[in-house]
Image (spheres, grey):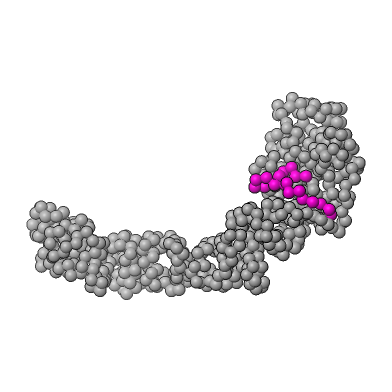
Amino acid sequence: MLLFSTEPHPGESLYSLLLRTAKSNFMDNPNWILQNFKDFSTLELIPNEINWLSDANLKKMSEFLSISYQKAKELSFHSTLSQHQLAINSIEKNPWFLYSRTKCCPLCLQESTYHKKNWSSSHSLICTKHGIFLIDACPDCNTSFKIQSIVENKCKRCNLSIDSVISKQIAQSSTLIKYQRIVDGLFTPSNFIYDHPYINNISSFIKVLEFIANWAVRILPSEKLDLKVLSFTYDGNAKERNSLKNAKHIEQAICIYGFAFMVLENWPLNFYKMLNDAENSKKKDFFYFVDIIVPSLYNSELSFIAIEFGNFIAHEKLRLPNRYNFVCTEQIKLLNDNFNASIIHSNLLPTYSYEFAHKNINLVSSEDFNSFLIDFENSFTKEKLKERWKTSSIATLSILENKFLNNAFNFRSGSVNTWVIPKDSVIGFEKKLAAFSTQLPEQPITTRQAIEWFGPKNANILFDGILSGKIKFNFNKSIGESWVCKDEVYEFVSAVLLKNGETTGFIPLRNLVFILGVKKSDIIYWLRTGRFASFSEISIDSIPIINVNHFLDNYHTTLQLSMIYKIPIKRLLKKHRLGKVVSLSGPHFNDGQRLLFSRNIEIF
């Protein structure tokens, strides 16, 4: 255990407090307190990760230092990140806090020798109290500062007193002072004050800043990031793979975060300039930025950047009116899930195209699109209508294609066919059906069962029958779960199918299966055995109406007799077994698998 405890200073980091505690306990070597803590907790600490302690390990540290867990939490980096919803994947490469080095204000060290947590912020550049830039390395030997160096107030290599270093001053009126005061909001409980149309909290500010800085170093020439007015030059060495380096030195940070802040300060004009400069530079990362990164921002916290990219193409490249905002068609699906980018091929909206960074950018005016949505904001897609009605996809399409619903339309893009069905039309159609609703009919089957029976492509015929009063209908929950009379369905649909056959000259085999109430294989057998008269083709999907009429003029199937005489099929088959009804063919004649009766048969 420690002999003496030490109170933390305002804004101090956890590791700084641990090092000062070691000093107050007369430990000349800081490693001694790490060993002391290991003996106390069994945890072996890595110095660079002490400020990252959390949960149970942080609790052990608070007990070791004799401070409350809440106080220890305030000194850690994790508390700042969780408070502002800033996520990390790796503490070594995280974008928010430096891992292996830190910065400091030498004038602050003259007042009190400890490390402030905000000095390790990747985005901190200035001490606003003293109006000077932070320093992160010894000016004599260029050794990077670590937290231990700050607390000891000396360069680890050459022993230079850090508080003696003279840092570059900056005027309190400078834009970068304004920037730093915003960044300091990460560490002080104050209201976020920044006049920007899309950024309203410190978390968004930091994320947007990091995004712009990260991509600026990838798509712009290095000289575009120089801060010439303050004599800072960007050396072009602050990036790695998909992010900025964690161990950026202060001059790099000043250039890239200063540039990113200037983009935000004069939004969107400086963003447009950034894109124009990137286009002229033609770096490989720029094409990736336009093709992949910008579309990925839609529906994210940074979506306004993608939206403004669309305006850049419209206003800067196409010279379209500035009074309108424009939307890239890739964004349409996120604005309204009834539509997607293929709407540009439908001629429903005026579209504008421009090739930029080897990519064809398609735009629509937000005004045009919003006006379009006013008419169809409560619309259904075919898929949603299918779910609402409990009908199959093919049956739903049959209803739509036969124009039962007013103002429904579809548009095609490649092989994709998209339907837009106004909600009022759907409700109107349902009310029209409900007006024909009666008591539960005799021999009820659901409309879904009926449609499956005679084929979903013919679903429209059922609703013609209902709306003409030829088929009794009982509304129940949804259209697919409502009830219809089986006999009336058969009578009406069969008549329509036969009439259609007279018009076209053919009847599809699937329709004939319904009309006769047999299997396809039975019809093929009767074709082969001449029941349909002379017919050469027996493998086709439809049969000439003349052959169908020959069959119907001479024969009845079991289903047809059942429907004509209103006799259940089981009872009819029983009569046949008892010899009261005589068939012309069937299994007992070794002539097919189904009974076939003379059309002239009479049943009593």
Task: Give 243 or 524, whichever is nearer the viewer.
Answer: 243
Please give the range of residues in magenta. 230-249
Q: Main secondary structure of the magenta part?
A: loop
In the rendered image, residue 552, in percent from the top left (x then y), is placed at: 16, 67
At 77% across and 31% down in the image, what residue appears?
64
Residue at 83%, 57% in the rendered image: 229
What's the residue at 20%, 69% (across, down)? 545
The quadrant the C terminus occupies is bottom left
Residue 556 appears in the picture as rendered: no
Q: Position of residue 484 (x, y in %)?
A: 31, 65
Q: Quadrant of the N terminus?
A: top right
Does 27 appear in magenta?
Answer: no
Quadrant position of residue 303: bottom right
List x then y, in percent, for residue 475: 37, 66
- How many badges with numbers are in the image? 0
Find out whether residue 231 is within the magenta segment.
yes
Residue at horizontal 33 percent and vertical 62 percent from the top? 456
Identify whether 404 is placed above or below 231. below
- Observer able to see residue 170: yes
- Viewer-proximal residue among 513 and 604: 513
Image position of 483 (left or right of 426): left
Q: Is residue 554 above or below residue 300?
A: below
Query: Residue 5 appears in which quarter of the rendering?
Result: top right
121 to the left or right of 89: right
